[in-house]
Image: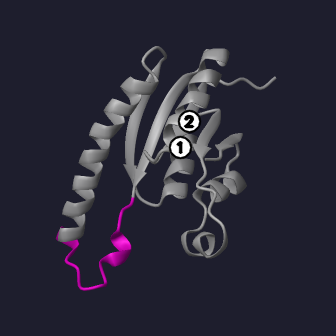
Amino acid sequence: MATIKSIMCAVDFSDISAKVAAYTKLLAKAFNASVKVVYVAPSLSQYVGFHVPPTSIENFVGEIVSGAEKTMDSFVQEHFSDIEVSGRVLSGYAAEEILNFAKAEDVDMIIMGTHGRKGIDRVLFGSVAEKIVKSASIPVMTIRP
């Protein structure tokens, strides 16, 4: 029988993140599972060829990660104060980093939000959630806004 002992809560700190956290906490308590909250900062390495010095991009990404780590600490304290939890800020392509982290940390389930994009927005921005649902080898629960 399948067991859920470790849940990844993938957030982007948008308005839906609190809702994703609430569902994650509910399931974590029900299964007595630990939670790993993950945020992925963009690497921006694709902009190196646009006459932007790599050091400028690295500094900017470093500031994003530093700010995200502070936000992560607050987010974890606010939403997961009474369960076993850890927060982690990663950098890179969101879908790829989430899948790699889930595998490396041996989590049993991923819970994440969707933005509900449609039409041209979906074509332009894609769907991280869709890529994870299609590629993950473990259950993925998506929360719509």
Rendering coords of residue 107 (x, y %): 59, 34
- The reply to whether residue 16 is visible in this rendering is yes
Q: To which quarter of the image does residue 60 belong?
A: bottom left
Q: Amino acid at mark 1?
A: Ile
- The reply to whether residue 104 is visible in this rendering is no
On the rendered structure, is 44 left or right of 66? right
Q: To which quarter of the image does residue 135 belong?
A: bottom right
Residue displayed at 72% across by 23% down: 3
**Residue found farthest to the right:** 1
Q: Amino acid at mark 2?
A: Lys
Judged by its main secondary structure, the magenta piece is loop
Q: Which mark is residue 91?
A: none
Q: Is mark 1 in CB contact (under 8 Å) with mark 2?
A: yes
Q: Helix, strand, or loop for circle 2?
A: helix
On the rendered structure, is 110 left or right of 98? right
Q: Which residue is mark 2?
A: 19
Is 123 in front, or is 118?
118
Is 16 in front, or is 89?
16
Q: Helix, strand, or loop for circle 1?
A: helix
* Magenta-drawn segment: 42-55
Rendering coords of residue 5 (x, y %): 62, 22
Rendering coords of residue 93 (x, y %): 47, 61
Residue displayed at 71% across by 40% down: 139
Q: Which mark is residue 16?
A: 1
Rendering coords of residue 136 (x, y %): 67, 49
Residue 99: in magenta span: no
Q: Residues within 10 Å of mark 2 (few under 14, many from 20)?
A: some
Residue displayed at 27% across by 59% down: 61
When the figure is inspected, residue 107 is found, relative to residue 118, above or below; the finding is above
On the rendered structure, is 123 left or right of 16? right
Quarter holding the N terminus?
Answer: top right
